[in-house]
Image (spheres, rainbow, N blue to C red):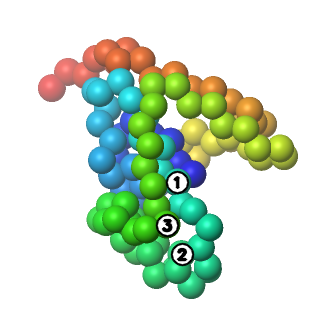
Amino acid sequence: MAVGNGSSYGGGMRICADARPDDGLFDVTVVGDCSRTTLLKVFPQVYKGTHLGHPKVTVHRAAKVTLEAAGSTAYADGEPLGPLPVTAHCVPGALRLLA
């Protein structure tokens, strides 16, 4: 599972390929139960964002997301935040960018 309000991270992986930073919603990309073989076949598509069309991949949108899993750690931009549960709120217009 990946939660993002931007389309890519981790060296260009487009995990949440359709996410928009200005819509006030997180994109939640979920990979369902699949074999290691399927995962290895689909993973290269992450760099183009075409993995979202795979039947084991679903995308949900929400302004607030709570993640819970016993014994798991939350990460943000590759850095550990701490143990779950964690709740995140997407606040539209919270960040201003100058072009």
Q: Nearer the viewer, residue 77 or 24?
A: 24
Q: Which mark is residue 30?
A: 1
Q: For this view, does 36 lie left or right of residue 73?
A: left
Q: Residue furthest right?
A: 71
Residue found 20% across the figure and 21% down from its top:
98
State whether residue 47 appears in this view: no
Q: For this view, does 43 lie left or right of residue 71?
A: left
Residue annotated with mark 2: 39
Q: Amino acid at mark 2?
A: Leu
* Residue 30 percent location from the top left of the image: 52, 54
Residue annotated with mark 3: 56
Q: CA distance from mark 3 to mark 1?
A: 8 Å
Look at the numbered discs 3 and 1 and tell me whether their residues touch, using CB distance below 8 Å.
no
Q: For this view, does 86 lie left or right of residue 2?
A: right
Give whichever of discs 3 and 1 has the lower sequence position: 1
* Residue 43 percent location from the top left of the image: 46, 72
Q: Is residue 12 above or below residue 82?
A: below
**How would you rate the neighbour count of disc 2 (Cα within 10 Å): few for under 14, some for 14-19, many for 20 or more?**
few
Q: Amino acid at mark 1?
A: Val
Residue found 52% across the figure and 25% down from its top:
64
* Residue 33 percent location from the top left of the image: 62, 67
* Residue 93 percent location from the top left of the image: 31, 15
Q: CA distance from mark 1 to mark 2?
A: 12 Å
Q: Residue furthest left?
A: 99
Residue found 34% across the figure and 65% down from its top:
53
Q: Is residue 95 above or below residue 83?
A: above
The quarter of the rendered structure image containing the C terminus is top left
